[in-house]
Every structure is written in C-alpha cells, then in structure tokens.
Image (cartoon, grey):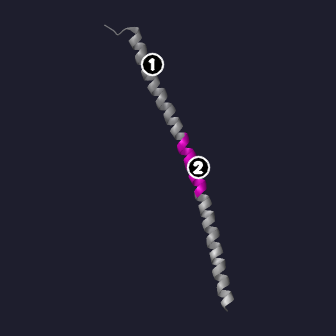
Amino acid sequence: MSPPPSLKWGYLRIITGTLAGGALGFYVMHRLENSYKEKMKQRLEMYAKEKMRREQLENDNSTSDYLSDS
C-alpha cells in the first residue's frame, strides 16, 4: 500500500526545500567568504605599503642623523 498523494507531495516539498536552502546557503556563504577575503587582501596591501613607508622614513632619518653628527 502506498502513502496518500498528499504525503508524497509533502515529502517532495521537504526534500526540495532542503536542497534549495542548502544551495542558497552555500551561495551566500561563498559570496561572504570571497568578499571578506578580498577586503583582507586590500587591508594587507595597505599595511605593507604603510610599513614600507615607515621603514623608508626611519632609514632616511637614521641616515640624516649620521650625516648631521659628522
């Protein structure tokens, strides 16, 4: 004896909703991870540039200190 059509329809809706929800959740998390990764990459580049600038200023200042002592 097979289940009534309404029960089959209910199972189909549950399975379809689960699959669609999983796919949507995966897509949203994928987008969030990619945007976060890109944002962190930009912050790392800005940090590296700032660090290089500070090192350059420090090197320039230390060189000028040696020259001024002479």
Q: Is residue 59 above or below residue 37?
A: below
The image quadrant that residue 42 belongs to is bottom right
Q: Amino acid at mark 2?
A: Glu
Quarter of the image that includes the C terminus: bottom right
- Alpha carbon separation for disc pair 2 and 1: 37 Å
Indicate yes or no whether the magenta region holds residue 20.
Answer: no
Q: Which mark is residue 23?
A: none
Q: Is residue 24 above or below residue 33?
A: above
Q: Is residue 64 above or below residue 41?
A: below
Residue at 46% from the left image edge and 31% from the top image edge: 22
Say which label, 2 or 1, has the lower sequence index: 1
Whole-percent x and y of residue 48?
60, 63
Q: Amino acid at mark 1?
A: Arg
Whether label 2 touches label 1, CB < 8 Å = no
Whole-percent x and y of residue 8?
40, 13
Q: Is residue 49 left or right of residue 2?
A: right
Indicate yes or no whether the magenta region holds residue 35.
Answer: yes
SS assignment for the magenta stretch, majority:
helix
Residue at 61% from the left image edge and 72% from the top image edge: 55
Residue at 65% from the left image edge and 85% from the top image edge: 65
Q: Element at badge 1?
A: helix
The image quadrant that residue 47 belongs to is bottom right
Whole-percent x and y of residue 14?
42, 21
Residue at 54% from the left image edge and 42% from the top image edge: 32
Whole-percent x and y of residue 24?
51, 31
Q: Is residue 9 left or right of residue 52?
A: left
User: Total label count?
Assistant: 2
Q: Can you identify the residue that label 2 sits on?
A: 38
Q: State the residue lying farthest toward the bottom.
A: 70
Q: Can you identify the residue that label 1 sits on?
A: 13
The residue stretch that appears in magenta: 31-43
Q: Nearer the viewer, residue 1 or 9?
A: 9
